[in-house]
Amino acid sequence: MPGMEPSSTEASDVVGALWDRMQARDWDGLAALLAEDAVVEWPVSGERITGRDDYVAVNREYPEGWSVRVLRIVAGDGEAVSEVEVPHEGVGTFRAVSFWTVRDGRIVRGTEYWTSPGADPRPAWRAAYTEPM
């Protein structure tokens, strides 16, 4: 119905399909989930990807040897947050927490925080209050 907000189920399903299609290297299927003018930001590396074609290309061109494991997706009102683990042969394991906005069944915006576990070591002053994971 016009004027209705997107459901959390829709956002969760779209984001789940995004990761499934990446894992399958289904680049046409991935493109179908993105608005043509989608914007995805990677603040950790200071990059912005503008447009569906560039987002698909940057993922398609990433060196092979990786897989995706979805750890969780939490969604509500056209927004979804995903946490994934991406082991990459010979490189290591990456983690990403991503915030997605879904409208009309397509991702229109994303902000992804990519890192490697342990890449940001705890400072000495916190050692008395924390323990290694």
Image: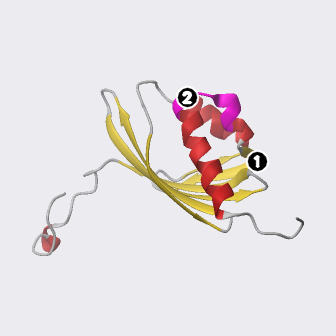
Q: Amino acid at mark 2?
A: Ala
| Quarter of the figure with residue 120 | bottom left
47 sits to left or right of 70: right
Q: Residues within 10 Å of mark 1 (few under 14, many from 20)?
A: some
**What residue is disc 1 on?**
35
Query: Of 74 and 118, which appears nearest the observer?
Result: 74
**What residue is disc 2 on?**
24
Report if residue 29 lies within the magenta region: yes
The residue positioned 75% from the left and 51% from the top of the image is 105
| Quarter of the figure with residue 44 | bottom left
CA–CA distance between discs 2 and 1? 20 Å
The location of residue 20, given as percent across then percent down, is 55, 37
| Quarter of the figure with residue 89 | top left
The residue positioned 74% from the left and 38% from the top of the image is 32
Q: Main secondary structure of the magenta part?
A: helix
The residue positioned 30% from the left and 27% from the top of the image is 90
The location of residue 132, given as percent across then percent down, is 15, 59
25 sits to left or right of 45: right
Q: Which residues are magenta?
A: 23-30
Q: Amino acid at mark 1?
A: Ala
Query: Of 80 and 4, which appears nearest the observer?
Result: 4
67 sits to left or right of 19: left
In the displayed structure, would residue 28 be above or below residue 7?
Answer: above
Using the rendered image of the protein, determine whether residue 61 is visible from the camera's viewpoint: no
The location of residue 22, given as percent across then percent down, is 56, 35
Q: Residue furthest right?
A: 2
Q: Residues within 10 Å of mark 2 (few under 14, many from 20)?
A: few
